[in-house]
Structures are given as C-alpha cells and as structure tokens.
Amino acid sequence: MAITSNASTSWSGALSSGTGTTTLGTGSTFDVTWKARAEEGGATTPEEFIAAAHASCYAMAFSHALDEAGHAPESLQTSAKVSFEPGKGITTSVLSVTGVVPGIDQEEFARIAEEAKSGCPVSQALAGVEIQLESATLQG
C-alpha cells in the first residue's frame, strides 16, 4: 500500500516580488520567496525541502544497507546540499554522512555509503541531477 505525503503553497504576487507560504501535511508552515531562492536569504526554498528529503531518505537507506551487511549503526548524521541556478534549475545534491557503527572499518563504511546513495528513493527521484557523496566518515 502506497503512503501519500502532501504539501501545499499559497503564493501572492509576481515571481520577483511575491511571497508564499508552504504548509506540510503535518501542519508545519514555511515562508518562501524567489529572493531566498535566487539570492540566498530570508525564507525557505524548494531546494531546502529537497535537501531535507534527500538527507532523511539517505539516512534511512544507508542505515538499512549497513544493517543488511551485518553492521547496524548506533547513529548516523547526514546532510544534503542542493544547488539551484536560476535559468538552469537544480544542478546537484551533495550528501555527507558521519556515523558510529561498531565492527566496521572506514573502507567498508565508505563503500556501503556510496552504494546506499543509488538505493535511496529520493536519489532515484532526482535522477536528472548530479548526486555526489562528499564524505563518509566513520567515528569512534
């Protein structure tokens, strides 16, 4: 059975001067503007939502891949940086992960991290975007 998530945005005005409010299905609301998207500042952007989705999905995919390889993680810290260029669109998503995983070495951690990148459903949804794994660091 598919789970459907939802969000909505209310927008007022022209692109360059307008403002909007995005509401997630959970009720959280965020201000959005073109200025924040094109010039960095002041409000949330669609790319920030994509970065949040990619970081959380990747954490789940990597956790699953580690567990399947017999190395259940104690903790993972993931981040995603999604780049947007006006006129071009979304160009990259760069993932980074740090983890505490007993019984694994750095080489195996990095190998599984790279494999999990393609297994992440959000990575698959972003197939037209360059996806990089910036770092995979084992702690402890």
Image (tube, helix red, strand yellow):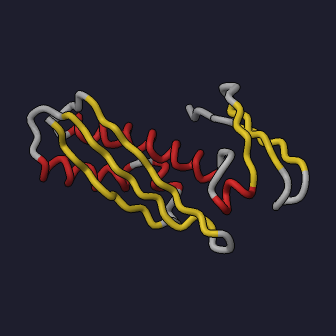
Quadrant the C terminus occupies: top left
> Is 117 in front, or is 140?
140
> Is 3 in front, or is 75?
75
The image shows residue 115, relative to residue 53, as above or below, that is below
* Residue 127 location (% of width, % of height): 50, 63
Is 67 displayed left or right of 102 in the figure? right
The image shows residue 36, relative to residue 92, as above or below, that is above
* Residue 92 location (% of width, % of height): 49, 64
Locate residue 17: give its quadrant: bottom right
Locate residue 31: give its quadrant: top right
The image shows residue 36, relative to residue 28, as above or below, that is below
Residue located at (58% from left, 48% from top):
48
Q: How many marks?
A: 0
Is 23 displayed left or right of 132 in the figure? right
Q: Residue furthest right?
A: 13
The image shows residue 7, relative to residue 90, as above or below, that is above
Is 128 displayed left or right of 111 in the figure? right
* Residue 80 location (% of width, % of height): 44, 50
Residue located at (25% from left, 50% from top):
136
Q: Residue furthest bottom?
A: 87
Residue located at (47% from left, 54% from top):
81
